[in-house]
Image (tube, helix red, strand yellow):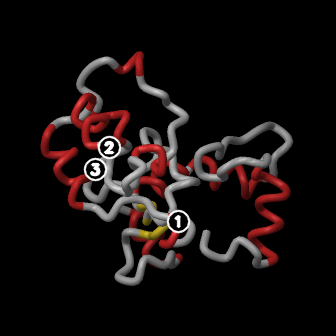
Amino acid sequence: MHEKEALWARVIYAKYGRNRNILQEMHKTSADSPLWKALANIRETFTKHTLIAVGDGRSTMLWLDRWVKDAPPLIQLVNNNIESINIEMKVNEGVLGDGNWNIQLFKRYLPEDIFEHIRALVPANENLGADTIRWGLSHDGMFTVSSAYKAIAD
């Protein structure tokens, strides 16, 4: 996830990425290898233990990705007017021109405790670099096979 230019990552993205966010679009087809089919089968377990660390907010889906700690994707928490949500919205679009969160947006759709939690987060900002995926089962946010095995075995 952090090594997009590494050979293994380029092969996976070229073969299975289908020119999209590989985690959002991870699905299997009959032509895929047994390895990819097995990975697609554990996608839910994997994404449950990942969190996106928002940097510039350009690659993280505001409503569909898991970027607020201790919360599911925000779409699962919307309390009204779900039909009016722009589902394709990125996190950086939830920031106003003055660099602060668009609190009215979050207040309109989310429970108070969640929008207060978002208000406490540093807003997406180009100076923070690209968004990154962090593994929640390690102290440093890096994926390890042993921690993934424990998550699947439990």
Residue 118, horizontal then vertical, whole percent: 26, 52
Q: Secondary structure at mark 3?
A: loop
Q: How many numbered marks does the figure carry?
A: 3
The image quadrant of residue 31 is top right
Residue type at mark 2? Asn
Q: Quadrant of residue 102?
A: top left
- In this figure, which residue is indicated by the disc labeled 1? 126
Q: CA distance from mark 2 to mark 1?
A: 17 Å
Give the Cα distance between marks 3 and 1.
24 Å
- Residue 89 coordinates in the image, percent (x, y): 51, 38
Which residue, given by chain and number where applicable, does mark 2 sit on? 102
- At horizontal 32% and vertical 64% (from top left) the residue drawn is 122
Q: Amino acid at mark 1?
A: Glu
Q: Is 87 rendered above or below residue 98?
A: above
* 61 with respect to 76 (left or right): right
Q: For the residue carrying disc 1, how many other residues have a C-alpha within 10 Å: few (<14), some (14-19), or many (20+)? A: few
In 3D space, how far apart are the residues under numbered discs 2 and 3 (Cα atoms)?
19 Å
| Residue that badge 3 annotates | 71
Q: Which residue is drawn at the image coordinates 43% and 75% (left, top)?
A: 147
Of badges 2 and 3, the one in the foreground is 2
- Taking depth in this image into account, of 31 and 5 the one nearest to the observer is 5
